[in-house]
Amino acid sequence: MGMNLTKIFRPQTMAIIGVSLSNPFNPANVIYNKNRHHCTAGTYGVNPKGGELYGQRIYKSISEIPVPVDLAVISVKADFVPQVIRECIKCGVGGAIIISGGFTESGKQYLEKEIRDTAVKNDFPVIGPNCLGVMSYPYVDTFFLSRERLIALNPGNVSLISQSGGILVDQLIKLTQEGVGIARAVSIGNKAVLDEVDILEYLKTDRDTDVIGIYVEGFKEDRGRKFIETANGMKKPVIIIKSGKTPGGTRAVSSHTASIAGDYTTFRHVVEKSRAIEATSENEFVSFCEVLSNYPGKRVTNTCIITASGGHGAMASDGLYDTGIMIPEIPEDDRIRLKALVSENIRDIASFSNPVDLTGSAGDIDFVESVKFFFSTDYIDCVLLLLLPYLPGISTDIGSRISELVRTFKKPLVVYIPHVDKYDIFIEGFEGNGIPVAHSVEGAVNMVKAIAGEKI
């Protein structure tokens, strides 16, 4: 729609409309407290009764606030929202986020239409209604979830867009657990005014965003085509996960955010022909976001698998073969040279074909020398490393040692390590140095798949 969204994502001032003077668990109160204490935007509370809250003045209307307001966060009964929107426009507010529910999903389509008509006529950007809104640190956080209920997010380069607030929070948690940092997170709800396309357009030029992940339920009429056109014009990877693939899922989508789920088969075929990447599961979505956040702009075709277990190497090889990624043969001269570099105790039992099976007797130096060797070649542009931390020859230093090679050669490395609490120190050795770690062979293959092919 071409609206300016800067004041929604980077507000200097914000008004929380609908704070309660008696209920500290009211969503507006949670948002008010979080932003006053943890975000940079100057925060002002509004309640028609006025008064005082936590020693701060509460204003009777947005017109009473003594400074220009960039962003209004609206959490009042649905019937009152259109009037509040008109007041915001009259007072020169830069944009609004409507937290309130009770609109089209409850049969009150007319309220949503009134909001849309007013906003479009006045070029006034609105996110929602029926949403969590925007998390855009350090500026603003309208998620009405208390900080103690969430894990602390890391700042980073991945931005997420979701129709479902619950799905969005789940993905934020999963990505954070994998060491991925977040730039922006947007819950768009019913999309009365702004939708995925508008947010995508904003993130296209957002300097903090390198990777965009989107949870899609359905599109408003004619917006699916525009979404694909916008994704095709992006230089940043766009990863999509969609619900509403089945009759039951379609019904759930319709009742949730009043979206048209559309025909999934058609959607899938369109995405396949676009620059966007479809994730077919939550695990795949997290894997794609993680690897692309570490290697934005990288594209690989020829992968070398280095493993401590022949079975793991075979599984990874099968998985990569199905994707069309090349697993080149290792020239005989190089096999001989690599054999001379590894420890003497594995020279006669290791296999130096691709996959390279260093066996369970390998130690740090064997993995380090092997990764370094293949990074030095011109026929390998990515290494998939399958590590088993329970092997006696591997130390907790292996992550930092191999990470140095990634920084030196500037070639992507993807690591598999089983997800067990006692192996966290091994995982952190890689993830803490910007190396993506998968916890299944399938997940590792998915990561390589995400940085392969012409879509990226």
Image: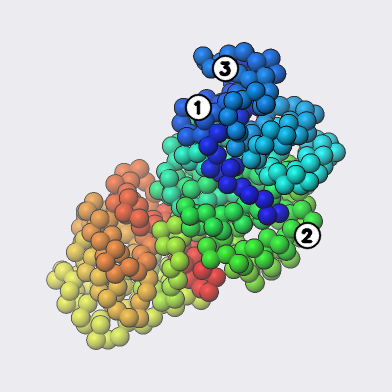
Q: Position of residue 84 (x, y in %)?
A: 74, 30
Label 1 secondary element: helix
Q: Position of residue 328 (x, y in %)?
A: 39, 80
The answer to whether 111 appears left or right of 420 in the picture is right
Q: Is residue 249 visible?
A: yes
Which residue is nearer to you in this view: 327 or 210? Answer: 210
Q: For marks 1 and 3, give the CA distance.
A: 13 Å
Q: Which residue is mark 3?
A: 57
Q: Amino acid at mark 3?
A: Arg
The label shown at residue 36 is 1
Label whose residue precedes the other's in the sequence (3 or 2): 3
Label 2 secondary element: loop
Q: Which residue is mark 2?
A: 222
Which residue is nearer to you in this view: 407 or 119? Answer: 119
Q: For marks 1 and 2, give the CA distance.
A: 40 Å
In the depicted structure, whether residue 79 falls above or below residue 354: above
Quarter where residue 352 is shown = bottom left
From the image, state whether disc 3 or disc 2 is nearer to you. Answer: 3
Q: Amino acid at mark 2?
A: Asp
Q: Is residue 168 visible?
A: no
In the depicted structure, whether residue 437 falls above or below residue 173: below
Q: Residues within 10 Å of mark 3 (few under 14, many from 20)?
A: some
Q: For marks 3 and 2, give the CA distance.
A: 45 Å
Q: Residue visible at 44% across and 76% down?
A: 301
Q: Position of residue 141 (x, y in %)?
A: 54, 36
